[in-house]
């Protein structure tokens, strides 16, 4: 099995910063940790869930097109990996539920990092980020 446990989130003023964390664990993950990409998606009210950022075991990253304010990172420790999403200069339009996700790299091209929702097999429960203007 694979569990994703998120932390962080809450209320922040526009222009502020916030960091989200997510830890992956479980036999499914730990037996092949290097093959799992981890990422963040977000879903605002009335909108589709959209990709934010992803990172591989080795630290390769990819971001959504308009990024210049978010940074994803990953720490690997034995049977677990924890990813972080540092969000700076937050705007009201960043308000959303942020979801952590894990996607297996099997079947992808070498170096490819998944960015599509269907490429992620496991999801966290989501954490609310509210940016007040």
Image: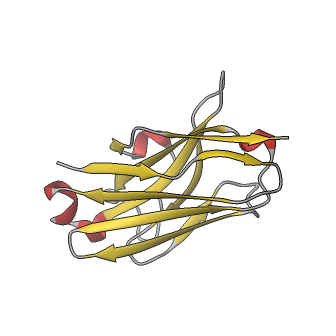
- Horizontal side of 81 relative to 14 (left or right) equals left
- Whether residue 88 is visible, yes or no, is yes
| Number of marks present in the image shown | 0
- Horizontal side of 75 relative to 35 (left or right) equals right
| Image coordinates for residue 112, horizontal then vertical, percent | 47, 64
Q: Depth check: 24 or 32 in front?
A: 24
Q: Depth check: 40 or 19 in front?
A: 19
| Image coordinates for residue 34, horizontal then vertical, percent | 29, 71
- Horizontal side of 41 relative to 27 (left or right) equals right
Q: Quadrant of residue 16?
A: bottom right
Q: Quadrant of residue 121?
A: top left
Question: What residue do we see at 23% from left, 50% from top?
Answer: 2
| Image coordinates for residue 32, horizontal then vertical, percent | 20, 66
Q: Is residue 74 above or below residue 121?
A: below
Question: What residue do we see at 26% from left, 49% from top?
Answer: 3
- Where does the C terminus fall, quadrant-wise? top right
| Image coordinates for residue 69, horizontal then vertical, percent | 74, 62
- Horizontal side of 65 relative to 58 (left or right) equals right
Question: What residue do we see at 22% from left, 76% from top?
Answer: 78
Q: How is the image coloured?
A: secondary structure
Which residue appears farthest toward the right when viewing the image? 133
- Whether residue 114 is visible, yes or no, is no
């Amino acid at each position: 099995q694979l569990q994703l446990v998120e932390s962080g989130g809450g209320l922040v003023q526009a222009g502020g910063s916030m960091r989200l964390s997510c830890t992956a664990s479980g036999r499914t993950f730990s037996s092949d940790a290097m093959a799992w990409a981890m990422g963040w998606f977000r879903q605002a009210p009335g909108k589709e869930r959209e990709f934010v950022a992803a990172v591989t075991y080795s630290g390769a990253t990819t971001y959504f097109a308009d990024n210049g304010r978010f940074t994803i990172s990953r720490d690997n420790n034995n049977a677990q990996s924890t990813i972080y999403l540092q969000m700076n200069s937050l705007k009201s339009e960043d308000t959303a539920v942020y979801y952590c996700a894990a996607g297996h790299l099997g079947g992808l091209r070498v170096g490819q990092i998944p960015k599509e929702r269907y490429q992620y097999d496991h999801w966290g429960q989501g954490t609310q980020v509210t940016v007040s203007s």
